[in-house]
Structures are given as C-alpha cells and as structure tokens.
Amino acid sequence: MAKVALLSNPLSTGNRSLLPRVRAFCAENPDIFHYEVEHVDQIGEALKTIARVRPRILVVNGGDGTVQATLTELYHGEHFGATPPPVAVLPNGKTNLIALDLGAVGDPLVALQRIVAIAGEDVQPYVVARELIALSNGDSNARPVLGMFLGGAGLADSMLYCRNKIYPLGLPNGVSHALTALAMVVSLFLGVRAAFLPPLPRPISVSVVRQGVVRGVFALLIVTTLHRLLLGWRGDSQGARSSSGALKLMMVDRNPLALIGATIASLFGRLGDGVLRGVHVERGDEIVIEGERPSVILDGELFEAEEGKAIILTPTAPVPFLSLAA
C-alpha cells in the first residue's frame, strides 16, 4: 500500500522543467507510487493500476486537460469502488484554478512534499467535498464530461485567443493573461473586429431550471463549483435569485455600462452583491446553454454543441479532495 499515488503527464507544458525534479523526489520516497501517462486516453488504465496500491491520496500532476480527464475517469470508472481517495492537484497548469481553490500555490514540488507529509498523519482534517460539473448534450447514452470551471460566451473566445495567439509567444503567464484581458476589453468595449483580437461573442440563451431564461450576447459567462472564485465574485452572494443549487452561474452583458459596472464591483470585491444592471448571478442544479452551435471551455478543454443541440450542465454527487488550506 502506497501513501501517495502521483499521476503525471510528461507532455504537459509545466512538466517540461518540473518532471525531472519530481522523478528525483519520488525515487527518494518509497511512499510515493508514480505513474506517468503520455495521453489522456491512458488515464483509465492508470487509475485501474493505481487502485491496486490503495493510496491514501491521489495527486494529479499535469495541465487542465489531465486534471479534467482524471476527474471524469475517476468518477465514471469507479476503479476505487465507493471510497475513492481524496484528490490533490499540483499547481502545474496555465490557470491553476482547481489547485488554487484547494490551497496549492507556488512551487509544485513544495506542494507535493506537503501532501506526502499529510499522508503520513490523519488525512481527514484536510478532506473537503466538492461537486463536479457534468457537461452533456442531453444524450443519455453518452458519458458526461466532468470538471469544475466552465467559461462561455466572450470568456471562452478570450481563453481560446490566449491559448492560440498569446501563449505561443512564450511570455510569462501573468503577462499573457494581461495582454488577453487588454485585447478582450478593446474587442468588447469598442466592438472592433480584427484578426489579432478575440472574436465578438454570438447570441445565446441560458436557462436555470425553475429560475427562467436569460437571452442575449454576453461578454462573460462562468459556471463553477469552486469555492474560491474569480474577479471578486462570491458564489454565495446575495445577488443570486436563488441561494440553493451546487452550480454557481454569472453572466455579464456585452455592453460598456455592464462591463464597467462589473469591473468596478470586482475591484471592490462586491461583484454579485445586490442587483447590478447587466450582471446576472444565479445558482441552480441544471443549466442549459442554447444558441448557434454554442461552445464552452471546461477546465481548459473546448466543447461545442452539435447543430440543434444544447449544452446541459448538472452537478455530480460530492467528490473528496485534499485541501492544503484546511
């Protein structure tokens, strides 16, 4: 029995420099079972093997796609039966939202050292429950894809723009994100169309079951089950029409006044508090996104609905994670 099972993807960007240090650390620590995959299709077989060593903690070391594929396979594959180990995520991706929510920041190897130390004591005080977002197109025969942070509308376009146009420049992540934000502002505020700017978002309709339908063109659409949210937005804020439901939804209309209001509220940590024109905050247990082939990004991976079909989001049952901030 291993105290910690580490699942690494050597091909993720962060592991190009990190993995040699991780391998050396694992070689010196017999309590770690290290399994490397080179493609997400191998994650199912990896978890099947890892389940045999019965780890106290499962650690994911890879980019957003590796984390998402691991969560999907862990939930649907049931390799650990009814009692899967808590999942820890090393801060080794471009955005690190899940790792940040779980208190893993800074040097990934330092976080791994802390996880190994926790595995040698009582793990339970560090275990937290998080629901996952299950994304499907309504096909009951298809396996939903699972994740924890979804971006849509103008946000999805900007995330793809950052990945395809800015990241290849080789700039630091902070600089890349700042340039993307600037390009997004120019595109959305001024309505400028250009090959070097993100495309303008298309109209969509978003419905929260039992809450109604909101139709429009949105600069920002976020659905998440994370507790540590973005832009000063608090998922339990009073601005939501419903305080129940595991899925937290926020949308901002694509118009200058709404964007300025949301930006100011964000700077003061008040986004979602009270009613702000053009800002829609909801909570629910089923969200339907419809439009002309609507597309979203779930934990860094792009998903686009087929013609005439919608993107349907529901929460899963709670999954155990390891929080370094506990």
Image: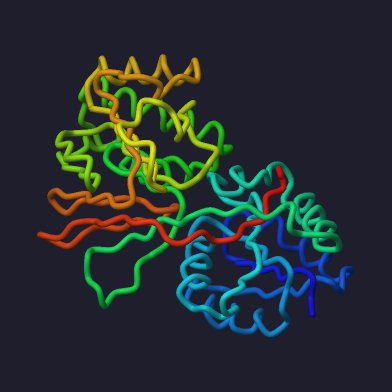
Above or below, comparing residue 81 to residue 130 in the picture:
below
Above or below, comparing residue 1 to residue 315 in the picture:
below
Classify residue 175 as left or right of residue 14.
left
Residue 224 appears anywhere in the view: yes
Residue 197 in the image, given as x and y percentages of width and height = 30, 33
Classify residue 121 as left or right of residue 43.
right
- Quadrant placement of the C terminus: top right
Residue 46 in the image, given as x and y percentages of width and height = 60, 79
| Residue lying at 44% horizontally and 52% vertically, measured from the top left | 300
- Quadrant placement of the N terminus: bottom right
| Residue lying at 55% horizontally and 57% vertically, measured from the top left | 63
Above or below, comparing residue 93 to residue 195 in the picture:
below
Residue 159 appears anywhere in the view: no
Residue 95 in the image, given as x and y percentages of width and height = 53, 44
Looking at the picture, tell me which residue is in the foreground, 45 or 169. Answer: 45
Residue 30 in the image, given as x and y percentages of width and height = 87, 74
| Residue lying at 15% horizontally and 39% vertically, measured from the top left | 203
